[in-house]
Amino acid sequence: MMVILKTKNELQLMQKAGAITAAALHAGGAAVKPGVTTKEIDKIIHDYIVSHGAVPSFLGYGGFPASACISVNDEVIHGIPGNRVLQEGDIVSIDVGAKINGYHGDSAYTFPCGKIDAETQKLLDGTKKSLENAIAQAVVGNRLGDISYAVQSTVEPMGLSVVREYVGHGVGRDLHEAPEVPNYGTAGRGIRLAAGMVLAIEPMINAGGWPIKVLGDGWTVKTRDGKMSAHFEHTVAITQNGPVILTELK
Ligand code: MG
Ligand code: MG
C-alpha cells in the first residue's frame, strides 16, 4: 500500500480536524469522575464534535455503535460506551476521531478517575513518555522502525509490555491509511520517513504481559492477565521543520 503524502494545504485542513479531535477528547476526559457512566462521556464527545461541524469518525465505522471508544482498566482499546459506572481508582482510555473538510484527526488519552495507585500511575507515565519519545523520532530521514523502537525501548525497561496485535497507522482522508506503525521494532529499519506523512502514533501498553483477547461483543480488547492497560495517541505530521502534533490540545 502506498503512503499518501499530504500537501501544506492538506496539513492545514488536518490541523482543524486535529484541533476538534483534541478538544472533544479532553472535554470527555474532564468528565471522568466516580459515578459517571461511560455513555455520558461518549455523549459529551459526540455533542462536541457535531456542534463544531465535524463528524465522529468512529460512529458506524465497521459497525461501531458510539462516537468514542472508552476502555476502562484492563480494557486495552475499542471499549463500547455504556452503563458502566466509573469508580475511584479506575483508569479510562478514551479514543476519539473527528472528520471535517474530508480529513480525520485521531487521538487517545488515558485519564485517571480520582486517585489511582502508584503502579497504575507508573503505567500512565511510561505510556505517555513512550509516545513523546516516538514523536521525537518522527523526523524526515529517519526510518519507521525508529518510531517503533522508541516506544518499545521506553516501556520495556520499566517492566511494562507492548501490545502486538494492534498498531498505529497513517491517517488522512481515510481513518486508517498506510503505513502500519507498530509499537515494537528495530531502529534503522522500515520505510524512510518523508515530509507530508501523517501518522497516528498510538502506544497501547500493558502493566502485565502483552497478550490480549477480544470479548464476545466483537469489539472490546482486554488484557489476558486482567492487569491494567493504557493508550495514548496523537496524529503527527512529519515536516521539514520537524514533527507537528495535529491533535495537541490548544
Ligand atoms: Mg485512535
Ligand atoms: Mg488510531
Image (cartoon, rainbow, N blue to C red):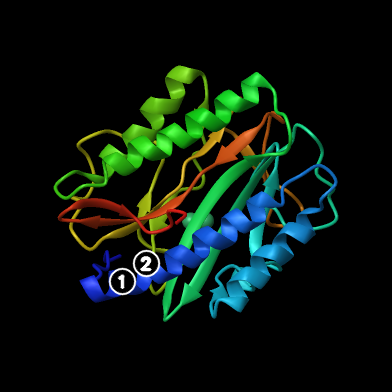
At which x and y percent is residue 15?
Answer: 37, 67
Q: Is residue 66 above or below residue 109?
A: below
At 22% from the left and 71% from the top, the residue drawn is 8
Q: Residues within 10 Å of mark 2 (few under 14, many from 20)?
A: many
- Residue 209 appears in the rendering: no
Can you say which quadrant of the picture contains the C terminus? bottom left
- Which structural element holds mark 2? helix
Which of 145/73 is in front?
73
- Which structural element holds mark 1? helix
Q: Name the residue beneath numbered marker 2.
A: 15
At 74% from the left and 35% from the top, the residue drawn is 114
At 63% from the left and 20% from the top, the residue drawn is 119
Which of 18/74 is in front?
18
Quadrant in the picture for residue 171: bottom left
- Residue 219 appears in the rendering: yes
At which x and y percent is residue 201?
Answer: 40, 49
The CA span between labels 2 and 1 is: 5 Å
At 27% from the left and 64% from the top, the residue drawn is 3
Can you say which quadrant of the picture contains the N terminus? bottom left
- Residue 2 is left or right of residue 98, and the answer is left
- Residue 101 is left or right of residue 11, and the answer is right
At which x and y percent is residue 98?
Answer: 52, 69
What amino acid does circle 1 point to? Gln
Name the disc covering residue 93, or none: none
Q: Name the residue beneath numbered marker 1.
A: 12
Which of 143/165 is in front?
143
Total labels: the figure holds 2
Q: Are marks 2 and 1 in contact (CB under 8 Å)?
A: yes
Q: Is residue 223 above or below residue 103?
A: above
What amino acid does circle 2 point to? Gln
- Residue 194 is left or right of residue 154, and the answer is left
Is ligand 2 closer than 8 angstroms to the Cβ of mark 1? no
